[in-house]
Image: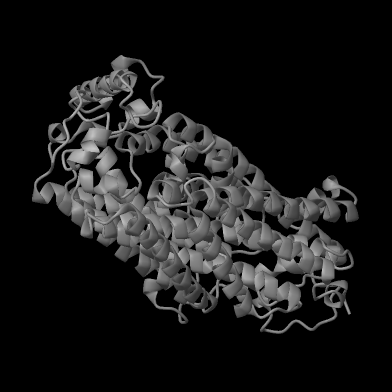
Amino acid sequence: MSEAEEFSTFGVWDYVVFGGMLCISLAIGFYHGCTGKKQSTTEEFLLADRNMNPIPVAMSLVASFISAITVLGTPAEVYIYGSMFWLFSFTYIFVAIFVARLFIPMFFRLNVTSANEYLEKRFNKVVRICGTLTFFLYMVMYMGIVIYAPALALNAVTGLSLWGAVLATGLVCTVYTTVGGMKAVLWTDVFQTCVMMAGFLAIIIEGSSRLGGVGNVWTIAEEGGRIDFWNFDFDPTIRHTFWSIVIGGSFTWCTTFGVNQSQVQRYMSTGSSTKATIALFMAAFGMVLVVSSACFSGLVMYSFYADKQCDPYSSNKVDQTDQLIPYFMLELFGSIPGLPGLFTSAVFSAALSTVSSGLNSLAAVTAEDMVKPCFPRMSQSRYTLTTKLIGLGFGLLCILMAYVTSLLNQGVLQLALSLFGITGGPLLGLFSLGLFFPWSNSKGAATGLICGLSFAFWVGIGAIIYPPYAYKPPLITSGCNFTLTTSSPLMTTEVPTEQEIPSIANLYTLSYSWYACVYWLVTVFVGLLVSFLTGATRSKDIDPVLRSHCVDGLYCFLPEVIKKPLRCGDDKLIDKKEDKEEMMVLDEKTGNMIGTGDVTMATEDASDDTKKEDACYENPLPVNPVA
């Protein structure tokens, strides 16, 4: 009997550590539900009163979309396929620059609660609803994966019922999110990020020490073919190459940090674009640190089993690759009371952070995009209660989606990143049509989104039915006491013959890391084509605050003589925009501006009450109340 099998259940101290993590998370939620305004206003419940410090916001940005997918999937990815995934960490720097220069200023100019408010101002109500429904699809499916992943790990470690763990994950985060609102989400994310990092560090330190140091870990991994960063092949069917990760990965994470409601709410909770930018760049550094820790944990795990010459996956000691890291944790800490509970808490904490942020953002989008337009005279207290009930409902729905996830035979990491591309790519394309392409109209935007989503789900579902071939470096099994059969996981890497799959399956061989980029291109191309066929919008007819110029956002260091022709005749719009922003600063000095150091924009379709409070309305003079 192996050490992992001997200590396959929790001890008392493991339950104490694990239960303590749950209690602290719930306590944070109830604390924020009983202090301040007691979450009695939507401003506090959804945006934390727009006065959060950038540091907890940055840690929350790190926690919300790296979560359990990173804790379980990334070490397994490096163990099975090699270190190429590590390059994803460097794309976060590029993503932070793009988002900070092109997206964040626009959201603060409009002072949004829901990111989809921009779509209605730029296009129309129909396009806004299309964006809302796409986000619903995206987040509900993603949170189903996130709930299922830690339950799987908990089941592998403790023997606890898989679906009992699913219910615990969903219900705990639903309770503290509904009670404590955005402040509870942000501060529990801070606590849960620390727990997650503690789990990684424990594995790295203990595993490296048993192997004789970090140098030996790297040497063993390199000899086993796990160190590979420099594949510059342009073939889009290869699972990971330098180009697919750096270019495709940048698009993938721009969908998350550029236009995803969960992240936009965090930016807006800081109350200023400057603070939001600081939080984003701190988060980029934090994500590099977390992903690097996860990847190195995978190398330590590979080197450990290569040294033992017995791979637990090939020898059928674990059923899925996502169970590798919990199994490895038992090998290291099975005899040390409390440490298995610490790692399981890390996995569970990561899931809680993601699901809680998702529930809060789903509640915000539903309330702002659907409830408020239908019931404009609803009282503040009733509106806040309705928003909380919406969050509760989505929590129950996501638990059901976890069951659907269990039926898909894919690793949680690839499944999650594929979903980012399938739904996030078209959504990013929709916002890009409005921000960067002045000729696009509402018909083109809606058609582009529908075509992008249709093509994305066609390819994505096809890739599940006919999984593309991916090369896996060999795993060492010479020290295992088992007989390799055709059912072994090692035998599943054969290239399928042409007789086994239809010719259309060649379309499904596209690497998942290119998904977001390709679907973005489809959405933008179709959107522009339909816009020109139905009557392109004139640049001068678009309010300049609804535009974001790549030239001025990303190439501000270039001389004006070069930037001017690259603006395609939009100089007048730039001048108007600068005039408006200058007027906003002057108006701020009068004390009428909402927030500090930011631009908030009142639109033509805003109510008179909103115009009275919005200092960026074109008329800087006070507006008389309307009866």
Q: Nearer the viewer, residue 88 or 19?
A: 19
Residue that sits furthest to the left in the current view: 535
Is 192 placed left or right of 524 in the picture?
right
Query: From the image, which quarter does the N terminus lie in?
Result: bottom right
Residue 310 in the image: state x and y as whole percent. Answer: 82, 70
Query: From the image, which quarter does the C terminus lie in?
Result: top left
Q: Using the rendered image of the protein, determine whether residue 251 is visible from the camera's viewpoint.
A: no
Is 534 placed left or right of 505 in the picture?
left
Quadrant position of residue 122 = top left
Quadrant position of residue 329 = bottom right
Residue 444 in the image: state x and y as whole percent. Answer: 18, 52
Residue at 86 percent across and 62 percent down: it is: 307
Residue at 83 percent across and 56 percent down: it is: 207
Is 198 placed left or right of 92 in the picture?
right
Residue that sits furthest to the front in the current view: 627
Q: Using the rendered image of the protein, determine whether residue 402 is visible from the camera's viewpoint.
A: yes
Q: Nearer the viewer, residue 613 or 126?
A: 613
Residue 316 in the image: state x and y as whole percent. Answer: 73, 79
